[in-house]
Every structure is written in structure tokens, then in C-alpha cells.
Image (tube, helix red, strand yellow):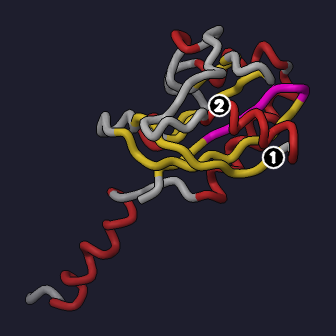
Amino acid sequence: MRPNLSALLCLPVLCLPLGAQEASPDETEALVKEAIAFAKANGKEAAIREITRPGGRFHKYGGELYVFVYDMNGKVVAHGQGASKVGVNQLNAKDPDGVAYIKERIELAKAKGKGWHNYKYLNPKDGKKESKTSYIEVWDNLIFGAGIYKK
């Protein structure tokens, strides 16, 4: 029996989404809202632990998409890249272009309570500094956020 050539040609197309998945803006925003809902239901401390826990529920795509939490003064409260970042004041942190992106994040949080902002950041998948956009939302005077790299 001869295999159906058209079926064989379609196989790579069907498998492509499995190997090349990337987070979408909608998925990023939903992850932030899920983290806030988790904090409301389980308490701030439980949320901080879960967000910072390696491989926890707020880590997606091999660690490329993760939740972070800052206070309104720029101090890291929880971070999906690990506990070593927690407690560090990042207020004056700048991206490779000299943009004080944490200050921008706080300004956006204070002005609108939520939204998207752009900056550059180290991609944990390839170690390169890349353009990134993050969705942030304020809950209980904390800035919850997650970001995706622009492709």
C-alpha cells in the first residue's frame, strides 16, 4: 500500500505548532490575572511563594513567560526568574538602551493601574537582550506583570 503523498506533506504543518509555540499577548495578560486571582484566593504570601517557585504554575514556555511582582518603590516582591531577585530594589535599573523601565512600569501603574510597556531584557532561552513588552496590573498596591519577547 502506497502512502498518501498529500497526507505526508501536511504532517510537518500539523506538527509545527507543537514545536514552535510562543506566548501571545492574550495569554500573557491572562497569566497576570490568574496570579492576582491566586493571590486573592490564597493570600499574598502564598502567591509570592508560588510565583517565585521554579517551574511553578506561573512559569510557561520553558521559563520564557513568567510572572513578576514589584512594590510601588521598585523593590522585587516575587519573580519567576528566581528567589535571588526578591528583595532587590530595581528602581534605577535600565535596559540596554538606557531606558529606566522599572520607573516607567511604576509610572504606568500609578497613572492607569494596568497596561503594556516596552523595553529590552535578557531572554532566558537564548541569553540575548531582546525587545520585550510586559502587561502589568496593580492589586493591593503591588504591580503584577508578565512579559513576552517581540518576534
Q: Is residue 84 left or right of residue 6?
A: right
Q: Is residue 79 left or right of residue 145?
A: left
Question: Do we see residue 51 in this rendering?
Answer: yes
State the predominant SS element of the stretch in magenta: strand
Front residue of 126 and 39: 126
Mark 1–mark 2 Cα distance, whole angstroms, equals 14 Å
Identify the residue under disc 1: 114
User: Residue visible at 32% across and 67% down?
Assistant: 16
Mark 2 burial class by Cα count in 10 Å: few <14, some 14-19, many 20+: many
Query: Between tags 1 and 2, which lies in front?
Result: 2
Residue type at mark 2?
Ile
Extreme residue toward the left, this view: 2
In the displayed structure, 140 sits above or below 17; it is: above
Judging depth in this view, the residue of 143 and 55 nearest the camera is 143
Looking at the rendering, the stretch of residues picked out in magenta corresponds to 140-146
The quarter of the picture where residue 38 lies is top right
Say which quadrant the N terminus sits in.
bottom left
- Image coordinates of residue 120 in percent, x first then y, are 47, 42
Is 138 covered by the magenta stretch?
no
- Identify the residue under disc 2: 102
Q: Tag 1: residue type? A: Lys
Q: Residue at x 18, y 90 (%)?
A: 4
Label 1 CA crowd tier, 10 Å (few <14, some 14–19, many 20+): some
